Amino acid sequence: MKISGRTRVCGLIGDPVEHSLSPSIQNAAFRSLGLDYVYVVLRVSKESLEDAILGMRGLGFRGLNVTMPHKIDVTRHLDELDETAKNVGSVNTILNRNGLLIGYTTDGIGALRALRYNGVDPSGKKIVLLGAGGASRSVSFTLAKEASEIVILNRTVEKAERLANDLTFVLGDGAKVRAEGLSDGNLKKELVDADVLVNATSVGMHPKEEETPVDRHFLRPKLVVFDLVYEPFETRLLREAREVGARTLDGLAMLVHQGAASIEIWTGVSAPTEVMMKAALEGLAEAKR
């Protein structure tokens, strides 16, 4: 990769960011497309967020991805938000359009593309979504438009109810959205006829790999199990789902596809998802060495 005075700069801001696979993924995409772009990682504290966004404008960065803990707070420092970002209330992608900073969220479309890329069409399906935090919120606003029914299960049921109410308010009364507590009883009841299970909690994430949000006895061969966690690559939930014959999808797929959507926002060019997935797998393997 050659850097010149014409090279356009994109990057990732968050804290921490040292572990991120995004540089490997995004730079592989830029190289594959033959674009004079470079992607860098920038550790930005909460106290420095406003300065960082001013710097993006002043230095002419083309785009930024935004990760924790800035996805919500960054919205206050942008000129515009697209419709989905307004509904979700957070941003993970910023486009600098000639000094105008526009915020997007690509997590939801990343999840939807990951499902479809792997041959799973959520249209008309019953989806059970675990969690009501930021990841769940981002994904739910996209999947609820496709599904025949979406059930949000969260340990704090009031938080699930708030998300369900927000979805109904935005999508209208035609959206079939329900909220329940995340318990064995509700998992057993809801997964009997569910088509897709999405884990948007952090349960099973490193370093607590042996935890799972769902007892294996509730998993079925006809169920699609999508875990947004990608470290470890195969969580206990996915391993046990695979063992009972269910179809599984890991969080790396969503990471790649939301990153692809970001590249398309910045460049207007279709992203090379195969190249990006290969780079993601190589980056994950390298991190384990």
Image (cartoon, rainbow, N blue to C red):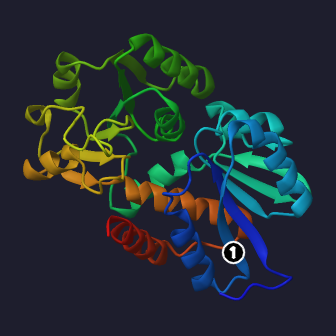
Say which quadrant the C terminus sits in. Answer: bottom left
Q: Amino acid at mark 1?
A: Val
Residue 229 vs residue 41, the one in the foreground: 41
For residue 110, side relative to residue 92 (left or right): left
| Residue closer to the observer: 148 or 132 | 132
Mark 1 neighbour class, 10 Å CA radius: few under 14, some 14 to 19, many 20 or more: many
Figure quadrant of residue 278: bottom left
Residue 85 image position (x, y, % from top left): 67, 39
Residue at coordinates 52% horizontally, 70% vertically from top-left? 25
Residue at position x 14%, y 52% from top? 242
Q: Is residue 223 visible?
A: no
Q: Position of residue 95 (x, y in %)?
A: 77, 56
* Label 1 secondary element: strand
The residue drawn where x is 24% and y is 44% is 209
Q: Quadrant of residue 11?
A: bottom right
Q: Position of residue 198 (x, y in %)?
A: 34, 40
Report x, y in % for residue 36: 73, 82
Quadrant housing the N terminus: bottom right
Q: How many marks?
A: 1
Vertical placement of residue 65 versus 125, above or below: below
Give the residue pinned by disc 1. 38
Is residue 132 something that shows in the picture?
yes
